[in-house]
Image: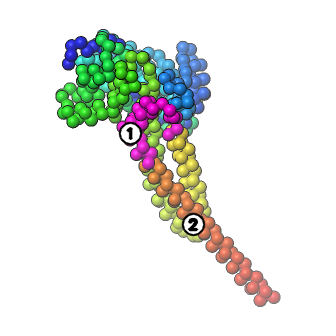
Amino acid sequence: MPATLHVKSGALVSHRLLDVANEIDLAHAETLWISHPGHQSRRTQLSTAGTNELAFGVPPALLVMPSMDIELGGVAMRAEMTARLYDFGAIVIAVRIPVSGLSWGDFSQRFNELDRATANEAPIWRNSLRMVLDIIGPALHRPAAKHLEEDYLFAIVHAFAEPMTAAQIREQANLPALLSGEARPLSSQQAAAITEQAFSYFDDDLVVATWDRAFLYEPRRDSDVVDIIEVANAQLLEMRYYDELLDEELAAMYDLVANARGGLSLLASRRAARLARRLYGLVAEVTELTERVENSLQVTEDVYLARVYGAALELFRVPRLSEAVDRKLAIIRDTYTALYDEASSRRAELLELAIVLLIVFEIILALAE
């Protein structure tokens, strides 16, 4: 590794994304947050893209949290803390540690130390989430009993000791090791696969994204790419939630359908109608919420950021999960239609039977006279 490759300034960032509710009333949450002394909040806007090019469907609320100490490699470091709230029920807690004056090797090592320090059971996530939920709890609609989670790491360089181009960084920096967390040399094939998703807008900026880590060289300190990758990750989290929810509903639905079709005709008709209404409500609710998630970022004319966003969605396999959710919704929708038709048919049969019985009753009365 070239001895001249030193990080003059940058940051290491760890994200923990959690699904906490069906919906968050952002305005109410902000009011609750800033009612506490020293707490600040603002709505997130993309800095480099115009609103007619790329914008949030509903701008998320960024809550500024008190700084915390976090230990990296036996050294306590001060971490900046924020929590970003999305209206579709996701919270993203971010730990940001500014760094400066590090060799590339030390920069990579500290990045891996941050990964270990913010592992799944790290107290910093549990404590931070409790702090946020204790304050904004009343703004949550249908809070989740359990929280699905995703995580992501960003290694950000704002300046090297010497000005660098994107090509020079890819040549001199060991990006495969940084993005894989591996200490042993990787094969050329694996190294190429890890750094495949690389993007540059100017000659002196660079984004390289993987499934769980990203490297950014951004001399102008723009945060749009970080925000866009975060949105894609939040969409992954929510699609996972709806996919698991529909799996549970499908498993229960088959038993309910069997019960609804059994028994006396009148009771079976009522059970089928009740289940049909429930399934219709489920389909309508999930369809509305998934559309809100999918439209959380509106991309129109900003080709560069759209490419980064699209690549992140593909990396996180969001389109595949979205297709799976659509397939399961289609199954439930077809079941609803079949149940509704069956309930209508049973009601028609009962009506015909009632008419026949009335006719027979009238005939009997006539004969009795």
Q: Is residue 100 above or below residue 361?
A: above
Q: Residue furthest front?
A: 203
Amino acid type at circle 2 is Glu
Q: Is residue 186 magenta?
A: no
Residue under the point 43% across and 49% down: 324
Q: Is residue 236 visible?
A: yes
Residue 236 position, x and y percent, is: 42, 38
Residue 69's image quarter? Answer: top left
Residue 102 is marked as none
Residue indicated by mark 1: 314
Residue 127 position, x and y percent, is: 43, 24
Q: Residues within 10 Å of mark 1 (few under 14, many from 20)?
A: some
Residue 11's image quarter? Answer: top left
Residue under the point 45% across and 37% down: 235
Side (left or right) of 141 relative to 228: right
**CA–CA distance in space, label 1 to label 2:** 41 Å
Residue 24 position, x and y percent, is: 55, 33
Of residue 66 and residue 179, the one placed in the foreground of this image is 179
Q: Is residue 113 visible?
A: no
Q: Secondary structure at mark 2?
A: helix
Residue 342 is marked as 2
Does label 1 or label 2 sit earlier along the sequence? 1
The residues colored magenta run 294-323
Location of the N terminus (image quadrant): top left
Report the label total: 2
Q: Viewer-nearest of labels 1 and 2? A: 1
Amino acid type at circle 1 is Glu
